[in-house]
Image (tube, rainbow, N blue to C red):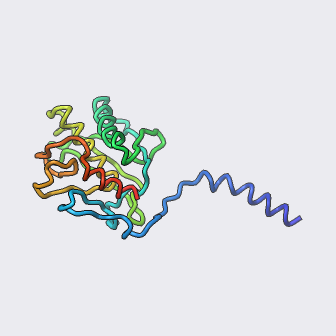
Amino acid sequence: MNVYKIILSILLVLPLVFTMHFVVSAHSASSCDSGSESRGWKVHCSNSSNGHIGIYSFDFKYSPNLSSSYKNITNQGKSRWNTVGAVNINYSSNSNNIVSQYSDPNTSTIAHVQSNTFNNHKTRWQLSYNDSKMDSRTDSKNIATSAHEFGHTIGLADLIQSSNEGKLMYGYSSRTVGYPQLSDITGAEEGVK
């Protein structure tokens, strides 16, 4: 009789286990290469406040206030990453990751990503566009900004040396490219580890 109770208990618990979402650190920080400015890419491998995504496929949803033009910018920005094969980023209305917009004319920030992390992996992030800055720019520049910010959702850090102006993750507006370059892709491949 006790065997039947055990089997019944297992059968009742198994569906719960398979529907739960787990965030687990599958590696030590040393297996994710942090890169460097001189290598043309940097990843938040062991940064507990920023972290890296740690998975190849992840999703996002739109904030209710996101306008259709910013949805378009977002879709084109994430597609620039998806086409290079380093990651697979998709829309899902059930995602905990959010893309939003806000208006703050009193800052120089054009867009930014905030993250929650656990064991150096992102558990949730929010990408926010500052429309008071972006509305006066071209679609081309805004799509490049979106692609750059999606690099942050992967876990890539800003590059600051002027020798990296030709990289998508260069952190200043003098960036000369709008698509992930080979070094950006190499960094993303580390970010998904």
Which residue occupies 52% across, 58% down?
Answer: 22
Residue closer to the observer: 35 or 107? 35
Q: Quadrant of the C terminus?
A: bottom left
Q: Quadrant of the N terminus?
A: bottom right
Taking the image as shown, residue 16 lies to the left or right of residue 141, namely: right
Residue located farthest toward the top when viewing the structure as drawn: 68
Q: Position of residue 179 (x, y in %)?
A: 24, 41
Taking the image as shown, residue 18 lies to the left or right of residue 5, namely: left
Up-down relation of residue 100 to residue 186 (above or below): above
Taking the image as shown, residue 183 lies to the left or right of residue 190, namely: left
Residue located farthest toward the right when viewing the structure as drawn: 1
Which residue occupies 16% across, 32% down?
Answer: 138
Up-down relation of residue 87 to residue 39 (above or below): above
Residue located farthest toward the front when viewing the structure as drawn: 182
Which residue occupies 28% across, 40% down?
Answer: 101
Find residue 43 and report its image quarter.
Answer: bottom left
Q: Position of residue 31 (x, y in %)?
A: 38, 67
Q: Position of residue 33 (x, y in %)?
A: 32, 64
Residue closer to the observer: 93 or 91? 91
Find residue 82 and report its image quarter.
Answer: top left
Taking the image as shown, residue 51 lies to the left or right of residue 148, namely: right
Which residue occupies 34% across, 38% down?
Answer: 79
- Give the total number of marks visible in the rendering: 0
Q: Position of residue 164 (x, y in %)?
A: 15, 53
